Amino acid sequence: MYDEIFMTEDPSKCNPRFWEELFLMKVNLEYLEGKLEALDGEELMKIKDNINCLFQHCIQALGEEHPIRVVNALQTLCALIRGVHQKNKSTSGFDIINMLVGFDKAELCMKNLMESLDSLLCAEGSESLKSLCLKLLLCLVTVTDNISQNTILEYVMINSIFEAILQILSSPLSRREHGYDAVVLLALLVNYRKYESVNPYIVKLSIVDDEATLNGMGLVITQALSEYNRQYKDKEEEHQSGFFSALTNMVGSMFIADADEKISVQTNEAILLALYEAVHLNRNFITVLAQSHPEMGLMTTPTSPIPMTPVTPLGTTPPSSDVISSAELPLDADVQTSNLLITFLKYSSIVMQDTKDEHRLHSGKLCLIILTCIAEDQYANAFLHDDNMNFRVNLHRMPMRHRKKAADKNLPCRPLVCAVLDLMVEFIVTHMMKEFPMDLYVRCIQIVHKLLCYQKKCRVRLHYTWRELWSALINLLKFLMSNETVLLAKHNIFTLALMVVNLFNMFITYGDTFLPTPSSYDELYYEIIRMHQNFDNLYSMVLRLSTNAGQWKEPASKVTHALVNIRAIINHFNPKIESYAAVNHISQLSEDQVLEVVRSNYDTLTLKLQDGLDQYERYSEQHKEAAFFKELVRSISINVRKNLAFNTLSQELLLKEFSTIS
C-alpha cells in the first residue's frame, strides 16, 4: 500500500476503501521513512498530491472512534513529517508546508490537526495515546535544528495547545506519565521566534497563577534534577570504591591522576531551560521554589498546607497569595525535607564543578542565570533570608589537594541564602585555571552583590561565615594578578577586579547595616590588613596600566579609584599595628591583639563616601543573552530529536491496549 502512495496515480482510484484499510494496518515506520529517503526533491514533487492526500487522511483518522486507527495515523504523521523534512535541503527548494498539506488547504488542515491533538490530550482516554500525541508534537517542534526556522510552528502558535499542557501538569496521574515530555515541549514552544514576534506561549506562561499547575511543573522539574543528582551520587560512590581498590593494586603513585577520572552523567539542559523560563517569565512560580516536600517519594503531592508568612519587606506583595503553603513536615528524623531550590542548588554544584566540556559550561552558565533571576526577586529574597525556614543543603564539593573533604553529617541548618553563598564561594575557589571562565565569574560576583543589596536594604543580619567569602575574593584578585599577561590576552580582567573591590567597598561602607555583629566588622578590617600585600600589588598593577596610554587605561583607572578606601584602611592601621608591636616588644601580633588595635583606632580613620555601591543593572535576556539561548535551544532540539524513539511506544503495548475493535 505504501508503494501505491509512491506512484503518481491516486491509490484510491482502483480501491475506494484504500485509506480506510491503510489505517487498520500496523505502521511500518522504517519502510515509510526509507521510501521518502530514497527519493530526491524532484521525484518527491511528482507525488506531492498523494503525500498531501495521506497527510489529510491521517488527520481525518485522528477523529475516528477506533483507537487503532488513531494510533496508526499518529505514527504515520511522525514518519511523514520526519521523512519530508529530511528531504528539505536548501537545494531541493520546495516548501515543507506545501509538500505536506498543500498551501490551499494548510490553514484548515493544521487547525484540524491541532484540535484533534488538543482533544486527545485533554480526554479521559488512553495514556499511551496521550504519550504518542506528545511525541508527535515534539517531533513537529524539533524537525529543524533551529526551531525558529520551522514554519509549521506558526500553526502551533495560532492553534494553541497551552491549556492541554497545563492540564497534564496539574493532574497527578497524567503528570507522572507525561510530565517530562509536556515540560520540555513547553520550554521549546516558548523559544519559537521569541525575539521577533509575539509568542502566545510566553504571554500565557507569564500569567499562570493556578497553584496546582505551577506545583505540578515544579514537581516534574524537581524529579528530573533529583534523578540526575542521584545518578551522580551513585556513580561517585561506585567510582570511589573502584578508585581505592585500584589504588591499592598500584605499585608507585605515578598513575593516580589517571585513575581519578571525571565522573560524568549527561546533563539535562532541556529541564534547566524549562526551570529558567518558569522563573524568568512567571513571578508566581517563585513560590514553588520553596514548596517543601520530603526528599523520599518526590511525587507525593503536598497535603494540608501550613501557612508560613515570610518576612516580606515593605512595598513588596508576594505574588498570588501571601503565604508559602508548605507541606506538613514529616516527623521522621531521617527524612530531610527538600524543595525545588535545594534540588537545583545541589544540581548546580555538580554541573558547575567541571566547565571544561561545552555542555557543562552551558549548563553552568544557565544555572547562574537562573540564580541571577532568583537573587533579583524581592519575594525569592524574602524566603531565602527567612530565619524560620532553615535547611541542611549538602552541596557537592570538588576534591582538591589542599582541603579535606567536609563531612556531611555536621551540616548546620541555615536559611537558604547561605547555601547560595556557599555555592558561589565554592565556584570562586575551584575555577582559577588557565581556561579561565571569565563570564561565569562575573555572574557569580553579581549574584553575591545582588544578595548583599537586599540585605543592606532590608537590614537582614545573616549569620554566615563571611570570612570564607572574603578570603575567596582576595585569592581571586591574587590569581588575576599573577596571571595578568595570559588573562589580558583574552579578557578584560579589570571589570572583574572592579566588581570584587566594590564588594569589599560594600562591606566597608554598609557592613554595619547587615553584618551580624560588630566583631564581624572588625574581622573584615583584620582580613584586609592581613592580606594587604594583595591589595598593594593590585594597586601598583592598575596604576602602572592607567598611566600608560594603552587599551587598559580606562578600566584600570576605575579600579584605582575604587581602591581608595581599602588603601586608606591599610595606610591608617598598619603604622598603628607596627608601633603597638614596637612599644610592646612583640615580633608577631596575635589576631586578638590586631583586633584590639583596630577597635581603638576607628575614630581617627577617614573614608570617602562612594556612590552607587548598592545599585545594579537588572538581568535582561533579549539584549545580552539572545545568542546564548539561540545556541542552547538548538542543541536541546537536536538532542530531543535524537532521543525521540517511536519504538518506545512499542506497537505490541498499544495493540494489547486496543486489541478489540468494536
Image (spheres, rainbow, N blue to C red):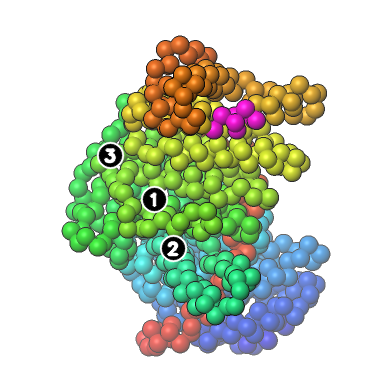
| Image quadrant where one finds the N terminus | bottom right
| In this rendering, the label closer to the viewer, 2 or 1 | 2
Instruction: Determine the residue positioned at 33% across, 40% down.
Output: 383
Say which element carries label 3. Answer: loop
Instruction: Determine the residue positioned at 73% across, 70% down.
Output: 87
Q: Is residue 227 above or below residue 466?
A: below
Q: CA distance from mark 3 to mark 2?
A: 27 Å
Q: Is residue 553 above or below residue 298?
A: above
Q: Which residues are magenta?
A: 531-538
Given the image, on which type of amino acid does mark 1 rest? Leu
- Seen in the image, is 581 located left or right of residue 305? right
Neighbour class for label 3 at 10 Å: few (<14), some, many (≥20)?
some
Mark 2 — residue?
Answer: 229
Mark 3 — residue?
Answer: 387
Task: Point out the residue furthest to the front here.
Answer: 585
Q: Which mark is residue 341?
A: 1
